[in-house]
Image (spheres, grey):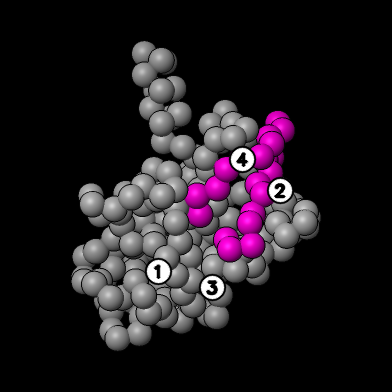
Amino acid sequence: MFTGIVEEVGVVARLRDHRLTVQARKVLGDMKLGDSIAVNGTCLTVVAMNEDSFSVDLSPETLRRTSFTGLAEGNVVNLERPLLVTDRLGGHIVQGHIDGTGRITSCTPEEDCVILRVRSPKKLMPYIVEKGFIAVDGISLTVVKRSALSFSLSVIPYTLQNTNLQGKTPGDLVNLEADILAKYVENLLSR
């Protein structure tokens, strides 16, 4: 389980044969083989590592559900280690199970913030509510407004400077994970 509070922005060193290698520093501190790591919000397993990078394998399902097929060497990715039981839950409950991808449609400055509008798959819209949570590339964010097929987010300067959102432009794909609580409630009520 994760919180959506990005610890570090890593750099894609290589993506070949379903193996992604990311250069990082902070998240490597206590990392060991077999550990989970969220890369752009996707929970993956560390399969190799050295003093300045780690590698994860990408299954066909992961590639179908995420924006990873568009990654290239030099791209930046959000990194978060799993939550420790003794940690504060600073963001929201994020599983690292990507529901689908959205596309950024606009980035509009508003004072010192940026309003991002994201077009979402129709199947995710019932889980996206105004003032509710959504994880965008693994970042815990609050929905400002929603429409039939999109939602907007107000991104503060700190988040822009410390995540991959600083380089995002209209047309870019982002990984989306809706709030798990809404999915469980829907499942229970449908019985």
Q: CA distance from mark 1 to mark 4?
A: 33 Å
Mark 2 vs mark 4: in front:
4
Find out whether residue 189 is within the magenta segment: no
Residue at 45% in and 61% down: 6
**Tags 4 and 3 touching, CB below 8 Å:** no
- Is the residue 126 above or below the residue 161 in the image? above
Q: Horizontally, is 168 left or right of 44 in the view?
A: right
The residue under label 3 is which amino acid type?
Val
* Residue 107 in sight here: no
- Is the residue 182 above or below the residue 144 in the image? above
Q: Which residue is mark 4?
A: 143
Percent x, y for residue 159? Answer: 57, 61
The residue under label 2 is which amino acid type?
Arg
- Closer-to-camera residue (121/4): 4
Q: Which mark is residue 76?
A: 3
Percent x, y for residue 154? Answer: 67, 49
Mark 3 vs mark 1: in front:
3
- The quadrant holding residue 41 is bottom left
Circle 2 Cα neighbour tier, 10 Å, few/some/many (<14 / 14–19 / ≥20): many
Mark 1 vs mark 4: in front:
4
Which span of residues is magenta-colored? 139-159
State the SS at label 2: strand
